[in-house]
Amino acid sequence: MITIYGRATSSNVQTVMWGIGELELACERLDYGHAFGGTDTPEFRAMNPNGLVPVIRDGGLVMFESCAILRYLASRYGGAPFWPADPVVRGPIDMWAEWAKTTLTRDFTGPVFWAVVRTPPSKRDPKKLAAALRQLDATLDILEARLARGRFVTGDDFTLADVVVGHSLFRYFTIDIPRRDRPALAAYYARLTERPAFREHVMVSYEPLRAREA
C-alpha cells in the first residue's frame, strides 16, 4: 500500500494522485498541508525537510518532489506507452514533462492562479497580472503548436508527460481570466476530462483556497 501525504486541493498532490490513478495502484492519501497542517512536525520534516506536500511512502522508500515521485512510480509499476523502458522513446516524454514543470507550471500557478484565486481582490495588481497572462499566452502557444500534432503531448498515446502538462488545465479553464481561442488545447483538455483518474483527482474544487477580504 502506497501512502501519500498531502491535501486533495494541492496541485502537486493532484499530479501524483492522477498518476497513481492511471497506474491503478492501491494507495491511501492523508490530508496534510494548508488548513490541515501537519507539515511542521518533526515526523513530517524527517520525511521532507522542506515541509511541503506531497510526500509518498512506498514500503521503506520515502520520497518528495512530485515529478520525481511520478518517474519512480512509472518506472517501478508502469510501462510503455506511459513510461517506456527504451530511453530513446522515453526521452521526449521526460523532456515535455520537465518543460511542463519548469515552464508551464511556473508561468501559470504563481503569477496567474495565485494572483486570481489566492489573492484578495483589493490586493491584486492588474498590471502585473496582465504581464503574467502575456507570458502564459506565449507558453501556451508552444503547447498549442505541439498538440496540433497529435492527440496527446508526445503523440497519440497518453504518457507521463500528459499528467505533468495536463494537471494545470482544469484550473486554467475554470478561473476568471481571458483565454485565447486555442482549438488544439481545448480538444486536448476535453480528452483529459474523459479520463476517470483526471476527473477524480484533478477536477477538484479550489474554493477552499480562495482568498477573502479581511
Image (tube, helix red, strand yellow):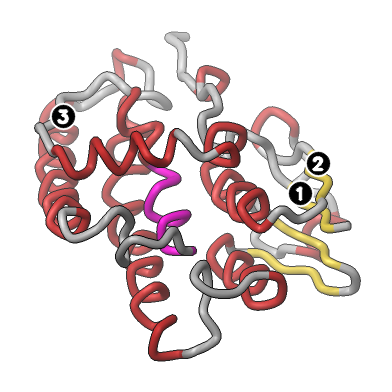
Q: Main secondary structure of the magenta part?
A: helix
Query: Helix, strand, or loop for circle 3?
Result: loop
The residue indicated by pointer 2 is: 30
Query: Helix, strand, or loop for circle 2?
Result: strand
Q: Nearer the viewer, residue 104 or 97?
A: 97
Q: Nearer the viewer, residue 11 or 90?
A: 90
Q: Which residue corresponds to the image point at 33% horizontal and 68% vertical from the top-left?
A: 96
Callout 1 environment at 10 Å: few (<14), some (14 to 19), or many (20+)?
many
Q: Position of residue 162 (x, y in %)?
A: 41, 56
Looking at the rendered structure, the kind of residue marked 2 is: Leu
The residue indicated by pointer 1 is: 5
Q: Give the vertical position of 32 relative to 151 (above or below).
A: above
Which is nearer the N-term, disc 1 or disc 3?
1
Which is nearer the N-term, disc 3 or disc 2?
2
Outermost residue, front side: 156
Callout 2 environment at 10 Å: few (<14), some (14 to 19), or many (20+)?
some
Judge from the rendering whether residue 97 lies leftward or rightward of residue 85; answer left or right: left
Q: Give the vertical position of 68 relative to 19 (above or below).
A: below
In three-dimensional space, the C-alpha distance between marks 1 and 3, rounded to whole angstroms, equals 34 Å
Q: Which residue corresponds to the image point at 72% horizontal and 68% vertical from the top-left?
A: 63
Q: Nearer the viewer, residue 71 or 7?
A: 71
Q: Which residue corresponds to the image point at 74% horizontal and 40% vertical from the top-left?
A: 32
Q: Position of residue 204 (x, y in %)?
A: 55, 27
Q: Quadrant of the N terminus?
A: bottom right
**Residue 179 disc label:** 3
Which is nearer the N-term, disc 1 or disc 2?
1
Nearer the viewer's eye, disc 3 or disc 2?
A: 3
Q: Which residues are magenta?
A: 160-168
Contact between labelled residues 2 and 1, with CB atoms less than 8 Å apart: yes
In three-dimensional space, the C-alpha distance between marks 3 and 2, rounded to whole angstroms, equals 35 Å
